[in-house]
Image: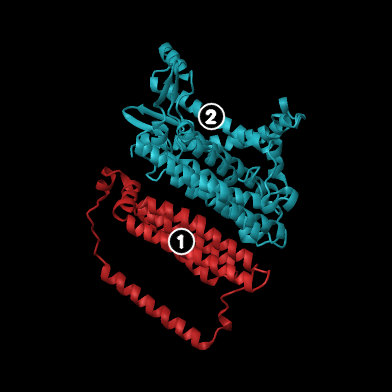
Amino acid sequence: MTSLEVTLMFVKIGIVLLGLLVTVPIMLFVERRGSALIQNRLGPNRMGPFGLFQAACDVIKFIFKEDRAPGHVNKFYYTIAPWIAVIPAFMTFAVIPFAGSLTIDGTETHFQIANLDVGVLYCFSVASLGVYGIIMAGWSSNNKYSLLGALRSSAQMISYELTLGLSIIGLMMVFQSVKLGDIAAAQGETLMQLGPVSIPKWGVFIQPVGFILFLVSMFAETNRLPFDLPEGESELIAGYHLEYGSMRFALFMMAEFVNMAVASGLITTLFFGGWQLLPGFATLVHLIQGMGLLQNDGLVLVLFQGMSFVIKLAFWMWFFVWVRWTLPRFRFDQLMNFGWKVLFPLGLINIFVTGILIYKGVL
Amino acid sequence: MDFGLLAFSIFSTIAILGSIMVILKKSPVAAAFSLVLVFFAFAGLYALMGAHLVAALQILVYTGAIMVLFVFVIMLLSQDEPVNDLKESSGLFKGVSVLGILGLMGLLIRAVLTARGMVPTGTLTDEKIVSMGGNVRLISEGIFTDHVFHFELTSFLLLGAVVSTVALAKRKAVSGGSKA
């Protein structure tokens, strides 16, 4: 590797890490004020304009709060559990492309930390490790509510991982690749032209059923309402993180927000064109390129691609909050029945129909 | 130091220490967690050999799904009964175990010594795999064209296992009363 490639690598890792870390306080704010908006109340609005500094106060509180572990826990697993929850969450983002490619001094670079051959399989496999953080926390806490939370989470994750896997097989069949970079790039084509409006070949237009299945199972995988049964505060007090406080609890919270960001990133990349420009952005890019402010024309394009990706991702993050404060929690048997008897067969049918359509040459 | 060698040393150390912990841990849940670590280290070793698909599937299937089920079942059945207490086993059992372990070890050492210097060569080189569309495409094409019969046969075997498990569990529930 040349020194430029190494520098670019570190820049890309830096962008993703910083981006994910910044997401956490923003989501703290959005979740608080967003829930207040939906429930027609004010929410925390005392600290700074619109309560923007509330997140900073929370972080300071988490850091300075006494970090005490209850005496009845299994110390080793109790300590490492939050880390096992949070590290895979960050690792998953490594294969998600956040902009197209840029040529600097003759070297083409793709804005994606690793363009692995296994692509989306890497995402799923690393994400499936996150459940151990929850299981370990629930078990090592030595508390029956925590243990119940851990049991629920393992059953839930296993059940919905199947649907998650099935839901994107149709998409892979259409795009003939498991690499997220290829899938994002292929979605730039036009699917059909309706008068002046051209509909892009986004995954959601090709695989609407797959998209819905993916979305629902992502809610289950990230333990968000309406599928937050491992926490279930009205039944299990706080479930798996009942015995955790201060920074360790904050790590679980961070894992949840980062998982949400990864889920939104995956939804964007697989079904909403990834870094493909939003409608109207192409004109803007031409305008700015024409002004000649930056020497490298590609840089403008990449910046706007990155912006499109972030806007799409932000919408799905908001969608997670929106759903959380709109739908009530499922009962556990409803969750299992829904996963196995509705979503799972639907996923199989979707693959079958997609196969027929591809054979007939429609897709 | 070579990066590959360094990574290999780290992953194999984790695998060996993890396997020892699986045996030595008193609590079954902790032993299962150690087994997860072993599987994870194996995935790292596979990735090091360039078998990225096998590594991803190893984590996805074994670490992410099967071991979660293991832990789930252990937690559901017995909270924390200590197992593997060697003090309670008989002298004969210990003797046989030691003999078995020594024999297995001898076999392994013999195998490693014989295989030293013999690099298995197939028709597929790294460059050829890349030119044919990568690991994922190659393996999936192999499974679903040339080996589709074996693949389907395996799935029937698994289906049979599931059906018989359900049948056994149901029969127990009927004869054993309401508690099952």
Report the residue at 50% width, 64% height from top: B163
Q: From the top left corner, tell me how far across and down residue A165 is, in percent.
A: 48, 47
Q: Which residue is mark 1?
A: B159
Q: Is residue B176 placed above or below A147 in the rendered structure?
A: below
Q: Residue B173 in the image: x percent, y percent?
A: 62, 69
Asked if A179 appears above or below A283 in the picture, the reply is below
Would you place residue A74 above or below residue A289 in this image? below
Q: Determine the secondary structure under disc 2.
A: helix
Q: Residue furthest top?
A: A291
- Tell me: residue A122, above or below residue A357: below
Disc 2 to disc 1, C-alpha distance: 42 Å
- Residue depicted at x 49% and y 57%: B63
Query: Residue A312, labelled with which disc?
Result: 2
Among the chains pictured, the one given red colouring is B
Label 2 CA crowd tier, 10 Å (few <14, some 14–19, many 20+): many
State which chain disc 1 sits on. Answer: B
Indicate the colour of chain A: cyan
Instruction: Locate residue A338, reporting x and y percent.
Output: 60, 48
Q: Residue at x 39, y 42 (%)?
A: A355
